[in-house]
Every structure is written in C-alpha cells, then in structure tokens.
Amino acid sequence: MSQRFVNRESKEEVLLFAKQLSELKLCPLTQGNVSIRDAATGLIVITPHDLPYDNMTIDDLVVIDLDGKVHEGSREPSSEWPVHCDVYRERKEVNGVIHSEPIYSNAFGAIHKEIAPIYVNMAIDVGGSVPVMPFTDSGNTEFGKEMLRLMGNRNAIIWANHGMLTCGKTLKAAFHCTVMVEICAEMYHIALCHGNPIAIPQPKIDLLIETGKE
Ligand SMILES: [Zn+2]
C-alpha cells in the first residue's frame, strides 16, 4: 500500500450510488449499505451506521480495512461491514458491494423462492438465478461464509425475510445488478400471476456472459 488515503473518487461513487438507491426506494429510511474497494489502498469505503441518505455527505462515509479497523471518518461503519469484508476477502474480482431491501425481491425472499432468470439483463448481471439464503441474523459470524457458499460465482443473493446483496467488478456494476434483479422480480411476480414463466437456460446465460454482451 503506497497510498495512505483513499481516492476521493471512491467516496464520491459510494455517496452517488447510495443516494440513487435511496431515491429509487431500494433502501428505505436508513436501511441497506453500500461499499467500494479503493484500488489505490485496498481499503473499503462504506456507508455509516443508521444515517438517512438524504443529507449524507462524503465526510459521513467510513474507511475501514478488511478487519473492520476504522482508518478514516468519525462515524461508526454500517453494522453489516463484516459481510462486505467477507465478500472482498473471498471474491478478489469484486470491487463493489450493495445490500438493499427492495420490495419485490424481498417478497420472493419471504416465500423462499429463488428469482428465475426470465429477463436477459438480469441473467447477465447475476450469472443465473438469484438464490435465497434461509433467514439468519446478518450479525452472525458465520453469515458471510454461508452466503458466499450459496452464491457461488453469482453476483446476487436474497437474504430471506431481510434483503438482497449484490456485488460486481465495479460499484456501478453492483448497482446495475441491484436494479435489474428488482425489475426482474417484479416481472417474475406478474408472469407467475399469468402462467408458468420460462427461464433462460443456463448454457445460454453462460454464453452471453462469455461473448461479452454485458
Ligand atoms: Zn439490512
């Protein structure tokens, strides 16, 4: 680590996407949390614990290392920082993580039904269906490990009776994935009301990803 402080751009990105998630009603009130892995330092910029997004500024963000030690900022990091750090530790290609609490995705979490890849943009972003992790307290030390096991190499998972986690090579990709899953969940809900939705076969999804139609 040659640089001591994280890039201002990393903080600006976290703030931008956190506010957009709030405006899109994907993170109600102070729910959800957003983080980025700063390329220059390897440190994590994360939204603070229990603060509304409306008036959040760059100075409210917290910089931590993978063990949760605070390097910058006067606030407490989001209480779900261990899950974010577990993802960064295990998935080296990931540089952005979002935990959101969207209505349609959460509805499928409530009935423990995975969201099938019935929408091409969601399928490419996620890499397949969105699995559901049975309810466990997200503060549990084994939570992140179990979540990563269920996710495999996918970029999204629903925490039953709680919310969603997405990740991506960039925070922008994780944001895109969050929005696409929620749109797909709404479509899936409507499709289920009318009949039997047909998912895109996994080999086709793999091919779309491989040919770079992202
Ligand atoms: Zn939550």
Image (cartoon, helix red, strand yellow):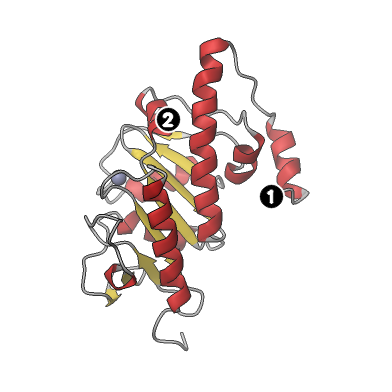
**How far across and how far down the image is residue 208, in percent?**
74, 43
> Who comes first in sequence, dot 2 or dot 1?
2
What is the secondary structure assignment of the residue under circle 2?
A: helix
What residue sits right under mark 2 in the picture? 104
Disc 2 CB within 8 Å of nearest ligand 1 atom: no
Mark 2 in CB contact with mark 1 (< 8 angstroms) = no
Q: Residue at x 38, y 22 (%)?
A: 111
- How far apart in space, not on screen, are marks 2 and 1 (Cα)? 24 Å
Q: Is residue 67 above or below residue 158?
A: below
Q: Residues within 10 Å of mark 2 (few under 14, many from 20)?
A: many
Q: Which mark is residue 73?
A: none
What residue sits right under mark 1 in the picture? 214
**How far across and how far down the image is residue 180, in percent?**
55, 40
Amino acid at dot 1: Glu
Question: In this view of the protein, which residue sits in the foreground, 18 or 4?
Answer: 18
Instruction: Identify the residue at the far right of this view.
Output: 211
User: For this view, does 129 lie left or right of residue 59?
Assistant: right
Q: Residues within 10 Å of mark 1 (few under 14, many from 20)?
A: few
Question: In this view of the protein, which residue sits in the foreground, 16 or 39?
Answer: 16
**How far across and how far down the image is residue 205, in percent?**
70, 38
Q: Residue at x 56, y 33 (%)?
A: 129
Amino acid at dot 2: Tyr
Q: Is residue 211 visible?
A: yes
Q: Residue at x 35, y 72 (%)?
A: 65
Q: Quadrant of residue 56?
A: bottom left
View quadrant of ligand 1: top left
What is the secondary structure assignment of the residue under circle 1?
A: loop
Q: Is residue 103 above or below residue 148?
A: above
